[in-house]
Amino acid sequence: MAMIGMATVMKDYPLYFDAVNEQGLGMAGLNYPGNAQYFAPVDKKANVASFELIPWILGQAKSVKDARELVKQLNITDDAFMPDLAPGTLHWLVSDRKGSIVLEQNKTGLYVYDNPIGVLTNNPSFDLQQFNLNNYQGLQVQNPQGKFGSLIVRNYCSGLGSLGLPGDLSSPGRFVRAAFTKMHATLGANEGERVSQFFHILASTAQVKGTNQLDNGNFEYTIYSSCANATKGRYYYTTYHNPQINCVSLDRYELKSQQLGRYPLQAANQINFQN
């Protein structure tokens, strides 16, 4: 089954970060350090290395339902793509037009979670991220009622209904922010408007370089963002230095070809000078 996505190609093999297949099933791997656990191969299991998982699922499953069946015997192995390239510590979001699931393998085994929210960030595990939303059930898009007990108070600005929405760069904070934004954002009238809205949702959790320093001194930031029209096989992306939306269409490539199609990342800033 053909698929399109973002990948680093090594030895003519695509190491996918995310992808969507020709049937409309999408999948993304996100960092899950300290929790992800991979095992040695096990007899009578589907032993799949972490770097193989996205093409393994998208190459066979047409839907989230198919993917759920496929992973029942899954064992994610600790095999490395190359000796000097350690397996990434990941968990995965799998989605189609009807819903989403999350795949996480930790020291006690593989877990498959229903994901009614449709978003995923990083640590902690998805069940804890979802439970944490209970702490934010008072958030709303409308301004609150103007009372504080018996005291009459007034809404001095708009947006007070979302007061308390996390604005930090932590994974739980970004999860809550992504969930709130995604579940309340309006749907555009056409594909162009919907793609634009999707990138606005992603921008609500984007990290600016220089604002989140890691223990090793490097900065964590949003290298790229992407979305897909899963029905038409159109993959859209932006990069940190190039916010212009770029698109690669699956239907413009020979799907039965055995050759890997590659398109260079448009990472350099492209400014439209109007005069």
Image (spheres, helix red, strand yellow):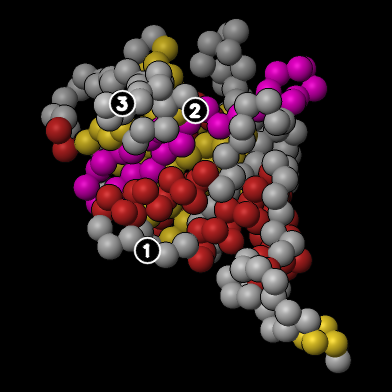
Residue name at image x 27 percent, y 26 percent:
275
Dot label at residue 35: none
The nearer-to-camera label among 3 and 2 is 3
Q: Residue furthest right?
A: 150
Q: Which residue is mark 1?
A: 187
Whether residue 233 is in magenta: the answer is yes
Q: Give the numbered dot on residue 240.
A: 2
The residue to which callout 3 is attached is: 273
Q: Nearer the viewer, residue 106 or 180?
A: 180
Q: Are marks 1 and 2 in contact (CB under 8 Å)?
A: no
Compare residues 156 and 55 and report the one nearer the observer.
156
**Amino acid at circle 3:** Phe
Q: Is residue 93 left or right of residue 125?
A: left
Mark 1 neighbour class, 10 Å CA radius: few under 14, some 14 to 19, many 20 or more: few
Badge 2 amino acid:
Tyr
SS assignment at label 2: loop
Assess whether mark 2 and mark 3 are in contact (beta carbons under 8 angstroms). Answer: no
Chain-order first, disc 1 or disc 3: 1
Kindly tell me whether residue 47 is visible in this rendering: no
Stretch of the chain drawn in magenta: 213-238
Residue 216 quadrant: top right
Q: Quadrant of residue 236?
A: top left
| Residue closer to the observer: 181 or 68 | 181
Q: Earlier in the sequence, mark 3 or mark 2?
A: 2
Between 44 and 163, the one nearer to me in the picture: 163
Residue depicted at x 42% and y 27%: 242
| Disc number lying in front (1 or 3) | 3
- Marks 1 and 2, Cα distance to the nearest angstrom? 25 Å
Q: Is residue 246 above or below residue 27?
A: above
| Element type where label 1 sits in the image | loop
Disc 3 from disc 2: Cα separation: 20 Å
